[in-house]
């Protein structure tokens, strides 16, 4: 590991650096907290071993600076001190220290502390990698969701809108930022269907799927026929955390169906009229 040693006593610092080298670590030395802070901002260190009492900037101040600095990966911080009182350790932990080494330094204890630090840094790196993978997956999902040609909406377990894609903005005429955290039914449900859809949402958030549910959405002076599908969203533990909805505009299909029915009715009437005319001609042909 790359370790920063911060110690105003040059003899103690030299001994610590040499001990770390024998253990297979690389290290750099700073004689006070201020110099160490400047060096830390330029070079990533996995571990900092710092004396507590130093001129210009002490170990606690240095630790606080490092904990507030988010440009590098997590740094394991060990305070090197002659203080052994519990209240002193509490102060160190509150400042962000991970561990303590009591003077005079014991090389066996140093090795054990660094082994603990290695395990903790490994876990931090694994968590960071998992977080990066999760963030990438969420970003990918968001990109796919926003680009869907079908109107999509996600809600939380309270029925409040969380995401609203571009196709939905185009369909409903409202931008996502305008209705974020708004109630799904308040935003899109027809007033005359509110109570019915409310029951459907309650069942949805209990785990029920909604398939091909038709409703009429009033858009200013025109009506749109929508096909509503929804599935619940669950956490890895199985708890329902919300739902994802799709709304498909079937207005043209419904109007075509209506037109076909109208044409069918007209055709049926014409066929009946033609039948009556044929019957009349038949009767006239038999009558002298």
Image (cartoon, rainbow, N blue to C red):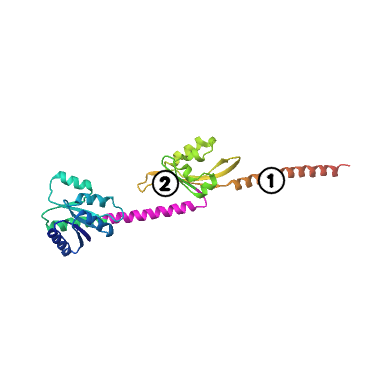
Task: Residue 197: give x, y in percent of width and height.
Answer: 50, 38
Provide the residue designation for mark 2.
233
Horizontal side of 234 relative to 185 (left or right) equals left
Residue 40 in percent (x, y) is at 25, 57
Give the overall secondary structure of the magenta segment. Answer: helix
Q: Which residue occupies 42% across, 55% down?
A: 140
Residue 3 screen position, x and y as percent = 21, 59
Whole-percent x, y for residue 105 in the image:
12, 56
Q: CA distance from mark 2 to mark 1?
A: 44 Å
- 37 falls in the magenta region: no
- Helix, strand, or loop for circle 1? helix
Mark 2 element type:
strand
Residue position marked by numbered label 1 in the rendering: 263
Give the extent of the magenta segment.
Answer: 123-151
Identify which residue, 145 or 40, lies in the foreground.
Answer: 40
Q: Quadrant of residue 46?
A: bottom left
User: Which of the two residues, 228 or 27, is positioned nearer the viewer here?
Assistant: 27
From this viewpoint, which residue is outermost toward the left?
104
User: Is 243 left or right of 115, judged from the image as shown?
Assistant: right
- Mark number displayed over residue 58: none
Residue 150 in the figure: left or right of residue 129: right
List the single residue furthest toward the front.
Answer: 56
């Amino acid at each position: 590991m790359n370790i920063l040693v911060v110690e105003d006593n040059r003899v103690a610092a030299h001994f610590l650096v040499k001990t770390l080298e024998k253990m297979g670590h690389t290290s750099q030395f700073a004689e006070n907290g201020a110099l160490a802070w400047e060096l830390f901002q330029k070079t990533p260190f996995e571990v900092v071993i710092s004396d507590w009492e130093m001129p210009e900037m002490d170990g606690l101040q240095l630790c606080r600076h490092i904990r507030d600095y988010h440009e590098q990966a997590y740094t394991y911080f060990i305070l090197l001190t002659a203080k052994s009182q519990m209240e002193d350790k509490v102060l160190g932990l509150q400042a962000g220290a991970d561990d303590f080494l009591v003077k005079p330094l014991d090389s066996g204890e140093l090795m054990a502390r660094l082994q603990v630090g290695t395990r903790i840094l490994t876990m931090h790196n694994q968590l960071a990698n998992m977080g990066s993978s999760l963030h990438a997956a969420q970003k990918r999902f968001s990109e796919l969701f926003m680009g869907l040609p079908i109107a999509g909406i996600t809600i939380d377990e309270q029925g409040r809108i969380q995401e609203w894609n571009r196709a939905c903005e185009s369909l409903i005429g409202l931008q996502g930022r305008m209705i974020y955290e708004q109630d799904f039914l308040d935003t899109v449900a027809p007033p005359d269907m509110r109570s019915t859809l409310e029951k459907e949402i309650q069942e949805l958030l209990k785990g029920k799927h909604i398939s091909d549910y038709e409703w009429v959405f009033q858009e200013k002076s025109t009506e749109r026929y929508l096909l509503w599908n929804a599935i619940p969203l669950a956490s890895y533990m199985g708890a329902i955390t919300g739902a994802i909805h799709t709304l498909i505009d079937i207005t043209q299909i419904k109007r075509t169906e209506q037109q076909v029915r109208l044409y069918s009715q007209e055709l049926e009437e014409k066929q009946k009229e033609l039948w009556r005319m044929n019957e009349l001609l038949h009767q006239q042909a038999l009558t002298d």
